[in-house]
Amino acid sequence: MDNRTKLGVVLLAAAILLGLVSPRSAGAASMVVDAASGAVLSAQAPNHLWYPASLTKLMTVYVALAEIEAGRLALADKLTVSARAASVPPVRFGLLAGETITVRQAIDVAIVASGNDAAIVLAEKIGGSEERFADLMTTTARSLGMTRTLFRNASGLPDEEQVTTARDMALLALTLIKEYPQYYPLFNQRKVTIGKRSRGTVNALLGSYKGADGFKTGFTCGSGYNLVASATRDGRRVIGVVLGSASRDQRTSQMTKLLDAGFARVATKDAAVTEAVLAEADAGAPPMVIAGGACATHGDGESAVIAAARAGAWGIAFGSFADKKKAEAVLADARRQLGPLAGARPTVAPRSYNGVKQWTAMIVGISQGAAGKACKKLWARNAYCLALRPEVLGNKATAWR
């Protein structure tokens, strides 16, 4: 890390420690920094733990770039897609087991299309396994000063232990752009193509905000809609982080407002928020933000589901099917794989999607922690699992796919 980078990192870390923070609200966590100085221009709950979702891939790519700069890896190196990488849950690019791609292609897919398969291909090449690579990611995060970030995988797929903060993500973005400016254009690509497969960028801000030129989106039902963005105006660069927005549109709107305000604020010591003090609540556990069309649509409820919701319990869904017997079979299989769960009440709930009646295989009445662990176990076996918080379970105008 050169002296210029160190200066930015020190200024950003000092700003947090000095309490340049606004109290956490019920919305999202956020931070805006001036890229040249590292000055904090605005912050809301910047140290609150959050699930990174696909923002994780920023660290995956950072580690890959570090390997390239160290001479242990090259953009043109060939990588073989493993069966595990090819079968990872969506979002994936569609890489096939045994297929050969380059390091550059894997990086492009991870950034542009947010491909989980490409992220795992990189992880297995560099770390030997995704688990060892995740340890390297965490070690690297600590070396950069990302004090509250912990990685368990390279993709950002849900893991209760994989957490970050707005402050840590801002620091990673700042370091990426300062240490590897020659690779920064990778984050501004609008399309990635491998053979006959082509995907456009998942980062809508690149096309909607004047001056936006890079970084990454992320979404899971647990994280809400996340975004790290960078933009330039009149030669000045501002970096923004938003964690936990309720929808894509809200994420884009919130980032637009934050960047606009950041550019309007002069990057001086006096410009930073200095009155608020870091609250203890800011270091709390990650929120679960099940929100948006990717997690819920419309339909009717089931009495067991509603009863669990009224008791403040969580549920997990294993898929929806036109045939009730198929749903019952999927539920029985899931129960065998998961074993006993405290408070669990298995049920098959009738729901409608686009006017078509379907049956959802579910277990309700469990705790948030049990729901997360259950889904993690099933995801490891490439099985579908969706954790549902009480507010979603109790909404009779909700259906799950």
Image (spheres, rainbow, N blue to C red):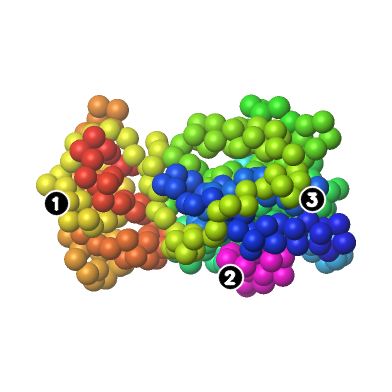
* Tag 3: amino acid: Ser
Label 2 or label 3, whichever lies nearer to me, is 3
Alpha carbon distance from label 2 to label 1: 39 Å
Q: Nearer the viewer, residue 57 or 104?
A: 57
Alpha carbon distance from label 2 to label 3: 35 Å
Which residue extends farthest left?
303
* Tag 2: amino acid: Glu
Horizontal side of residue 190 vs 4, given as left or right: left
* Tag 1: amino acid: Ala
Residue denoted by label 2: 131
Instruction: Say if mark 2 contacts mark 3, CB within 8 Å.
Output: no
Residue 132: where, in percent of width, then height? 62, 72
- Is label 1 in a helix, a strand or a loop? helix
Of labels 1 and 3, earlier in sequence is 3
- Is label 3 in a helix, a strand or a loop? loop
Of labels 2 and 1, earlier in sequence is 2
* Circle 3 Cα neighbour tier, 10 Å, few/some/many (<14 / 14–19 / ≥20): some
Residue denoted by label 3: 37
Of labels 2 and 3, earlier in sequence is 3
Span highlighted in magenta in the image: 132-149
Identity of the residue drawn at 48% across and 42% down = 245
User: Could one spot residue 83 in this view of the protein?
Assistant: no
Q: In this view, does 386 lie above or below 146?
A: above
Dividing the picture into quadrants, the one containing residue 368 is bottom left
Q: In which quarter of the image is the N terminus?
A: bottom right
Label 1 or label 3, whichever lies nearer to me, is 3
Residue denoted by label 1: 307
